Image: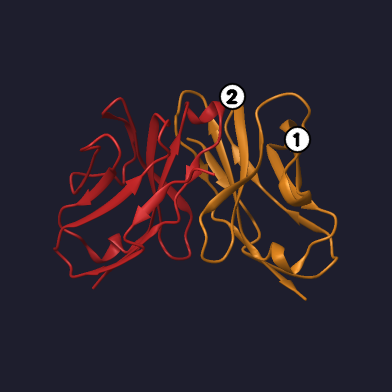
Amino acid sequence: EPEVTQTPSHQVTQMGQEVILRCVPISNHLYFYWYRQILGQKVEFLVSFYNNEISEKSEIFDDQFSVERPDGSNFTLKIRSTKLEDSAMYFCASISKKVHTGELFFGEGSRLTVL
Amino acid sequence: AQSVSQHNHHVILSEAASLELGCNYSYGGTVNLFWYVQYPGQHLQLLLKYFSGDPLVKGIKGFEAEFIKSKFSFNLRKPSVQWSDTAEYFCAVNGGSQGNLIFGKGTKLSVKP
């Protein structure tokens, strides 16, 4: 069964450092998402991406965050200068159509720890 | 703005007990509703979804959920839980023109063998 894969599974970084989280969505999917879950809190939407551009983003997705699909397969989330409050589990997801017509397929997540 | 409330933070049951996890949402228009499950160390997986039609939807592993529009609820049920159902369960809603899901805080279910 095809699946969404994410790397790294766990990254520890110092505050102020740049972090890139990588995702390989399911190959025929068209819509890509990043969500995050701070420990003990709800899963929160960050950004959606379609046709090589951001289609929606939440208030959390400020100028410190960026996404791109550099090579047609990877979908990356970059945090330019990490803060302590960026520590969370980051989930990538993809779907072949808009989510209101189908289900999101999630990766296993990348745990980011900012020290 | 849409929101999803899951009132139970942690539920502890013995095997064979019946389960009902509450989910309420706030949105005035047509919604699509989902329950996702996250087993320990694994990714979020879809349990079931409601788009339209029969408000009682059946999902995988014996789970079902009932959409009650008048109560803005989409509670998850299972008649007899197993130890392997130990996981965190997330209710989510998508409505209007939004392309993203709004998740509840999740309910952790622990089933004692």
Q: Which residue is depicted at the point 52% across and 60% down?
A: B42
| Label 1 close to label 2 by CB (< 8 Å) | no
Judging depth in this view, the residue of A15 and A33 nearest the camera is: A33
- Residue labelled with disc 2: B29
Which chain is orange in the rendering? Answer: B
Tell me if residue A2 comes above or below residue B15 in the rendering.
above
Instruction: Please tell me which residue is depicted at 56% across the width and 38% down the height of the picture.
Output: B93
Q: Amino acid at mark 2?
A: Gly
The red-coloured chain is labelled A
Residue B12's place in the image compared with A92, above or below, is: below
The image quarter containing residue B7 is bottom right
Q: Amino acid at mark 1?
A: Ile
Q: What is the quadrant of residue B109 in the picture?
A: bottom right
Q: Position of residue A4 (x, y in %)?
A: 43, 46
Q: Is residue A58 left or right of residue B60?
A: left
Secondary structure type for disc 2: loop
Q: Which residue is mark 1?
A: B68
Separation of residues labelled 1 and 2 (CA atoms): 14 Å
- Structural crowding at the residue carrying mark 2, measured as other residues with C-alpha within 10 Å and reported as few (<14), some (14–19) or many (≥20): few
Percent position of residue B97, x then y: 46, 23
Q: Identify whether A73 is placed above or below B88.
A: above
Looking at the image, the residue that sits furthest to the front is: A1
Residue located 39% across and 31% down the image: A31
Q: Which chain contains the residue that carries disc 1?
A: B
